Amino acid sequence: MSTNTAPSTNETPVLEAVHLRKEFPLHTIKLFGPQQAVHAVEDASLALRPGHATALVGESGSGKTTVARLLARLYAPTAGSIRYREEMVRARGEAALRSYRRHVQMVFQDPFSSLNPMHTVRYHLSRPLRIYGHAHSAAEETQLITSLLERVNLTPAEQFISKFPHQLSGGQRQRVAIARALAARPSVLLADEPVSMLDVSIRLDILNLLARLKEEENLALLFITHDLASARYFAEETQVMYAGQMVEGGPSEEVIQRPQHPYTQLLLSAAPDPDRFGSVDQHQQDDRKGSPRVQTVLPASGSVELPSLITPPGGCRFHPRCPHAMPVCRQQFPPRTELGGGHWVHCFLYGAENAQSGEVKGEIRRMPPGSTPPKGRPSKENE
Amino acid sequence: MNALNPVLDIGTQITDVLHAHGPSMSAERARARAVELLQMVSIAADRLRSYPHELSGGMRQRAMIAIALALDPEIIIMDEPTTALDVVVQRDILAQLMRLRHAFGFSVIFITHDLSLLLEIADTIAIMYAGRMVEMGACKDLQRSPRHPYTVGLLHSFPTLHGPRRSLTGIPGSPPDLRSVPAGCAFHPRCAFAFTACHTIEPTLLPVVPPAGIPSAGQGSCVACHLYDAELKPEGPPRSLESEHVN
């Protein structure tokens, strides 16, 4: 399985996650049998490129935040490795972590709790400047803080510099959080749902700000969201996660307009869409080619919940909810199938090279999205 | 998500409503009604003894709907009922709600910040800003021809799943501090079309008079904006505001 997620660009990734796995042990006393654990992330690989945004989409509990925290080294991975500029990131050591975090910074979801209410904006921004040795004098520090505030559109900066978090609105706080991350002069920014706690009218402002910073500073951005529409708006590349497994990925437009994995199709069919029915564009919509709308909005089994991550379903974790589940889906996790154009999927429906039969291969590859895959396909022979 | 009492099982919480409003109801009948209500929202009867922490977020929200339905109401007010839920669960709850509404004929007041969701499910939409209603109209009408600059801004604030990937601007500025709401129209500091009257006179919610010659798309629509006041703005709203969304 290749870890290169977007062959469409030739730039080398600045940060790469290779087969990351994270288990959180449960502290239960069990005399016999194995120690139980929450299998939060199973085999996650992704690559972040400079000047590129990668969106990680999934429901809450799908492990997307855990991936971000693994990348920020807030958690140590159970297995797998993280590579920064093609160099393996050392697991331990305060100094090693500090130099790593100088390059990889994180913006948290909730600006109301990610800033210390006891400290001013100046304090929040001066900490990274001092810790990473960017400011050498008080005057230089003030000047750097002012320019940081201006970069995140908090102007006039003098007005904001001595304010406390409670004196700022949610959007302004998130701007301070972004400025704080930028203060370290990182090359990678991990944004964990940066806009979901904010007022709708200012979400776009923050997204546009992040997009601008990405261009200007050539940042590699990881954008975690549960909203496919903003992933499409903001990120060049999108990866979809389900219950700790990466199920599909590729260029955003490709993944969202032509979703291949049944889970991505389900997510898209459930997303609010003003064009869905009775709208002005009704006829247009019907004519639209390659509409990802699937007939079955909800899985036939009736379960709309994520599976337990303590005893996750074997094989593909989506199989209990999947309308197209086959026996093989229960037994093993499907390998990665390249669909061309950088689009890949982990699903046996598209596992052409596993099917051994050329006839099936052609049939599956050309299957339009949303249509029912052929039933009663020959079972896989690669076990 | 946190509306249920964590120390009582959901059966007790449903029968509680029934007892409070109908003290004459016997315990058995109340229990039978509770089972019936849970089945209405597709929760198995054996969940009656479950505590809220044993239920998933979606089930908890459905249990809340069951409690709301207990007294056969004519109106159900739902305050961001699906905001804390995932899209797939949200879709499931909405489908149930629409089915129940169809079956029992109650009205729903759905409070949300998710305009894209409202455009899909609502019949009538009212837009509020800084404590005042600024526009109200039929859903489709609002989508096709938004009138208030704030509504126009909101409609341009969420990315879509289909169509061209256009650059979106959102609304400049941030929501006002309700301790010191701007004088006149509260939206004027963020409004690109504000003129002198907006700074001093507070607009009232008035029915929209469709301009002569144009088919009355805005029947029943109300808007609180001086741009539509013939006395203050005789030449009518700027073309750019209207044409932006009529496309």
Image: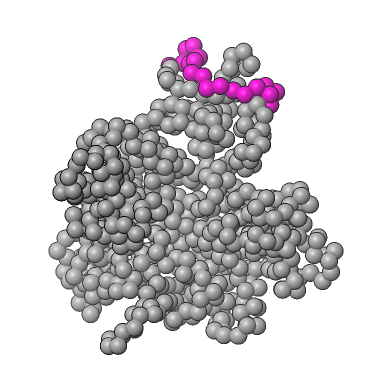
Q: Quadrant of residue A50?
A: bottom right
Residue B219: image x %, image y %?
42, 19
At x 36%, y 54%, the residue is B5
Q: Does B4 sit left or right of A332 as displayed? A: right
Residue A117 in view, yes or no: yes
Pick whichever, A211 or A140, lies toward us: A140
In the rendered image, residue A337, in percent from the top left (x then y), is placed at 34, 69
**On the rendered structure, is A158 left or right of B199?**
right
Residue A263 at x, y = what percent?
A: 32, 59
Residue nearer the viewer, B227 or A158:
A158
> Magenta stretch containing residue A292, yes or no?
no
Left or right: A139 with respect to A377?
right
The quadrant where residue B183 appears: top right
A85, A316: nearer the viewer? A316
Judged by its main secondary structure, the magenta piece is loop
The magenta stretch spans which residues?
A: B192-215
